[in-house]
Image: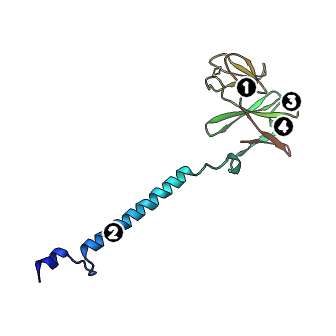
Amino acid sequence: MSESGEAEGKTLLGIPRRQLLGWLSRGFLSLWGIGFAWVTLAFLKPPRSRQSLGERVIKVGPLESIPVGQARLVRHGREPIFVVRTDEQTVVGLSGVCTHLHCVLDLNAEQRQLACPCHEGAFDLNGNVLKGPPPRPLVRYQVQTQLGQVYLHF
Ligand code: FES
């Protein structure tokens, strides 16, 4: 045998080593390209809308369990939400986070207020600013009462 035949190098399948390495290189590059395209498309795809997510309704409980002028604090993830019964028929959902510096509010049922414990900001039970530094009303959430049960929508 000549030395040039051994230098050319054949694999077990009889394919020249150089040709086999070319095929493997193209194969790996193709897989890398598919992976890159997959990640790029996943990045560019818009997120699902809030409406399309099924977990966006929380059952708060029976309407009768929330006395008029009181609230039930519901947590959704990290966000506290007050479900406030403002009168016999009306229940509102209000963010429990102040619009000023994002302190978590306390319910003051006697004064019918949601108050910041840090900066003397206060909101009425409809989320409107009563006093202090908050620049805007509280974020409101839709509340539904059905068959005596209260549901909070996101
Ligand atoms: S964070 Fe709003 S008044 Fe304190």
Separation of marks 2 and 4 at Cα, in angstroms:
70 Å
Which residue in the structure is indicated by mark 3?
Answer: 87
Identify the residue at horizontal 36%, vertical 67% (top origin). 26
Specify the quadrant of the image occupied by residue 129.
top right
First reached walking from the N terminus: tag 2 or tag 1: 2
Type of amino acid at the residue the image marks with label 4: Glu
- Tell me if label 3 and label 4 are in contact, CB under 8 Å: no
Separation of marks 2 and 1 at Cα, in angstroms:
62 Å
How busy is the neighbourhood of tag 1: few (under 14 within 10 Å), some, or many (20 plus)?
some
How busy is the neighbourhood of tag 2: few (under 14 within 10 Å), some, or many (20 plus)?
few
Compared to residue 56, the image places residue 99 above or below, namely above
Q: Disc 2 on helix, strand or loop?
A: helix
Q: Disc 4 on helix, strand or loop?
A: helix
Residue 4: image tag: none
Type of amino acid at the residue the image marks with label 3: Asp
Residue 17 location (% of width, % of height): 25, 73
First reached walking from the N terminus: tag 3 or tag 4: 4
Q: Across the whole image, how many numbered discs are drawn on residues?
A: 4
Type of amino acid at the residue the image marks with label 1: Pro
- Tell me if label 2 and label 1 are in contact, CB under 8 Å: no
Separation of marks 3 and 4 at Cα, in angstroms:
12 Å
Which residue in the structure is indicated by mark 4?
Answer: 64
- Tell me if label 2 and label 4 are in contact, CB under 8 Å: no
Specify the quadrant of the image occupied by residue 142.
top right
- Whether residue 99 sits left or right of residue 24 in the image: it is right
In the orientation shown, which residue stands out farthest toward the front? 4
Identify the image quadrant of the N terminus.
Answer: bottom left
Which residue in the structure is indicated by mark 2?
Answer: 24
Separation of marks 3 and 2 at Cα, in angstroms:
73 Å
Separation of marks 4 and 1 at Cα, in angstroms:
27 Å
Mark 3 or mark 1, which is nearer to you?
1
Mark 3 or mark 4, which is nearer to you?
3
